[in-house]
Amino acid sequence: MSYLSEFVKERRKSVNLTQEEFAQRAGVALTVVRKIEQGKTNLNMEKVNLVLNMFGHELAPLKLKRPHK
């Protein structure tokens, strides 16, 4: 999760927005932005995607290959 938190924090700062301003523009609560930037792991994927959409990105579940028997 540290990559996600660093990515969001750096991008937010690069557009000169406070956490509160960024949350408002992304359409999420301030606590969502704070949790992401703090590297919390208990996150709602839909809310994370609202934040990432601000930068043209999206998180998606990984498809893991099952070993053949």
Image: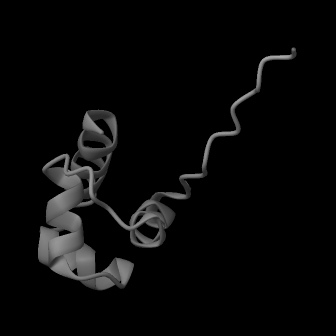
Q: Give x and y (percent) for residue 11.
A: 31, 50
Q: In this view, does 32 lie above or below 35?
A: below
Q: Give x and y (percent) for residue 61.
A: 60, 49
63 or 36, nearer to the observer:
63
32 or 21, nearer to the observer:
32
60 or 68, nearer to the observer:
68
18 or 23, nearer to the observer:
23
Horizontally, is 62 left or right of 51 in the view? right
Q: Is residue 67 above or below residue 48?
A: above
Q: In which quarter of the image is the C terminus?
A: top right
Q: Is residue 31 above or below residue 11?
A: below
Residue 20 occupies quadrant: bottom left
Q: Quadrant of the N terminus?
A: top left
Horizontally, is 65 left or right of 44 in the view? right
Q: Which residue ends up furthest to the front in the rendered image?
A: 69
Q: Measuring 25% from the left and 57% from the top, which residue is drawn there?
A: 12
Q: Give x and y (percent) for residue 48.
A: 40, 63
Q: Give x and y (percent) for residue 26.
A: 37, 77
Q: Measuring 17% from the left and 60% from the top, which residue is drawn there?
A: 35
Horizontally, is 3 left or right of 64 in the view? left
Residue 18 occupies quadrant: bottom left
Q: Measuring 63% from the left and 40% from the top, which residue is drawn there?
A: 62
Number of numbered discs on residues: 0
Q: Measuring 78% from the left and 18% from the top, which residue is drawn there?
A: 67
Residue 68 occupies quadrant: top right
